[in-house]
């Protein structure tokens, strides 16, 4: 069943090892794509999407489909624990993003996600990923604002494990 919680572990072991798999003929890739279109929630969906984004050939029609599906998935699922993983999987492909998903839009999406979610564990990861893109930040998100958000986040959260990571990034 595609709904088993351990499905991804078995599926991942069956992924092709070659760098240019045949997306139309490979049964394991077809299963992964079927999973993405059949069920759009949960950690397994996010892991399958991450794996397929790593395997897909940039600028191919399959890549564009996967990018569009992931972009669509992000909208309305901001409270999902998996949101961070999908957003970061897209960001990891920043050099090959399709025209339908400019890097500036993806970065703005991450910045928007930060607001109101300061108590979520993932906040640290999104903020640091944005900071790592300091040279590509959109005009709507100046570096000074991002740094201020990090400094503001520190106040009152000294007991959080991720406090040190934010503090060090601000140095």
Image (spheres, grey):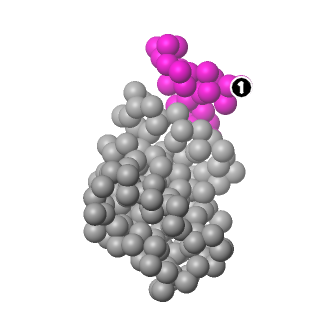
Residue at (52% x, 14% y) in the render: 158
Residue 170 inside the magenta-drawn segment: yes
Q: Which residues are magenta?
A: 143-171
User: To which residue does mark 1 refer?
Assistant: 171
Residue furthest to the bottom: 25
Relative to 3, does residue 37 appear above or below in the rendering? Answer: below
Q: Is residue 112 visible?
A: no
**Residue 40, how many percent across, how many down?**
30, 61
Instruction: Residue 115: name its quadrant.
Output: top left
How many numbered discs?
A: 1
Relative to 84, does residue 2 appear above or below in the rendering? Answer: below
**Residue 161, how many percent across, how many down?**
53, 21
Q: Secondary structure at mark 1?
A: loop
Where the C terminus falls, by quadrant?
Answer: top right
Q: Main secondary structure of the magenta part?
A: helix
Residue 75 inside the magenta-drawn segment: no
Mark 1 Cα within 10 Å, few/some/many (few <14, many 20+)?
few
Q: Is residue 166 visible?
A: yes
Q: Is residue 16 left or right of residue 77?
A: right
Relative to 18, does residue 8 appear above or below in the rendering? Answer: above
């Amino acid at each position: 069943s595609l709904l088993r919680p351990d499905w991804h572990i078995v599926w991942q072991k069956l992924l092709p090892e070659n760098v240019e798999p045949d997306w139309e003929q490979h049964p394991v890739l077809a299963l992964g794509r079927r999973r993405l279109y059949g069920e759009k929630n949960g950690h397994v969906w996010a892991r399958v999407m991450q794996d397929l984004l790593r395997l897909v050939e940039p600028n191919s029609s399959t890549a564009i489909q996967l990018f569009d599906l992931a972009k669509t998935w992000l909208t309305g699922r901001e409270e999902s624990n998996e949101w961070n993983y999908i957003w970061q999987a897209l960001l990891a492909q920043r050099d090959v993003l399709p025209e339908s998903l400019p890097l500036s839009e993806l970065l703005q999406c991450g910045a928007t996600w930060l607001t109101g979610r300061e108590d979520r564990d993932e906040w640290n990861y999104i903020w640091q990923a944005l900071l790592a893109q300091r040279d590509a930040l959109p005009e709507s998100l100046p570096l000074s604002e991002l740094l201020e958000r990090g400094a503001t986040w520190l106040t009152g959260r000294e007991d959080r494990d991720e406090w040190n990571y934010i503090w060090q990034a601000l140095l």
